[in-house]
């Protein structure tokens, strides 16, 4: 009986000493809702486990026409996840459907508990030759 109690105490001590960072990371399929971004796509994010304090993001455009799916790992630090991706068509100029597109470096940062955050989209040259810049948008990830 003593060995069973000792084993249970060891399991409990091990479990209690394990970092809980992964407990804050939600997984599954989410709709990415970006307020105010000039785009005709809806984005679905499939979030899954990866090695360490991170979540793997697979981004799927809806519709797939004139969009580029991407995937990368978002890193967890201090309760926030951060994902940075290079997007060939991140800034759409003129006609949202047929106008020119400009590549961006997009950085998503969101709270692992609320699944709300901010997208910072940076570009080397803006629409119609305007200077480089960064556009910032709020977003929410809504579980499907």
Image (spheres, rainbow, N blue to C red):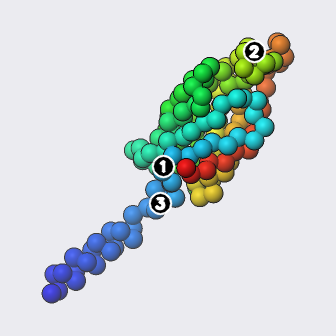
- Foreground tag (2 vs 3): 2
State the residue at coordinates (44%, 61%).
Answer: 19
> How far apart are the alpha carbons under marks 2 and 3?
43 Å
Distance CA(mark 1)–CA(mark 2)? 34 Å
**x, y (%) of residue 101?**
71, 17
Residue 97: image quadrant is top right
Task: Identify residue for label 2.
Answer: 99
Crowdedness near tag 1: few (<14), some (14–19) or many (≥20) residues, C-alpha within 10 Å: few
Precedes in sequence: disc 1 or disc 2: 1
Please name the residue that numbered disc 1 is placed on.
Answer: 28
Q: Is residue 128 above or below residue 112?
A: above
Q: Report the residue marked by disc 3.
A: 23
Q: Position of residue 69 (x, y in %)?
A: 54, 27
Is 62 located above or below residue 30 in the figure?
above
132 horizontally vs 143: left or right:
right
- Image coordinates of residue 60 in percent, x first then y, are 54, 33
- The one nearer the camera, 143 or 109, is 143
Q: Is residue 15 above or below residue 39?
A: below
């Amino acid at each position: 009986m003593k060995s069973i109690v000792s084993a249970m105490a060891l399991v409990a001590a091990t479990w209690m000493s394990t970092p809980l960072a992964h407990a804050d990371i939600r997984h599954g399929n989410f709709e990415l809702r970006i307020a105010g971004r000039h785009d005709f796509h809806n984005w679905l994010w499939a979030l899954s486990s990866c090695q360490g304090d991170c979540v793997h993001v697979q981004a799927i455009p809806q519709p797939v026409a004139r969009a580029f799916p991407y995937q990368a790992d978002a890193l967890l630090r201090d309760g926030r996840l951060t994902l940075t991706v290079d997007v060939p068509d991140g800034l759409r100029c003129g006609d949202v459907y047929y106008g020119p597109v400009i590549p961006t470096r997009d950085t998503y940062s969101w709270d692992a508990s609320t699944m709300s955050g901010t997208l910072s989209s940076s570009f080397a040259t803006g629409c119609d030759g305007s200077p480089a810049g960064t556009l910032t948008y709020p977003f929410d990830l809504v579980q499907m």
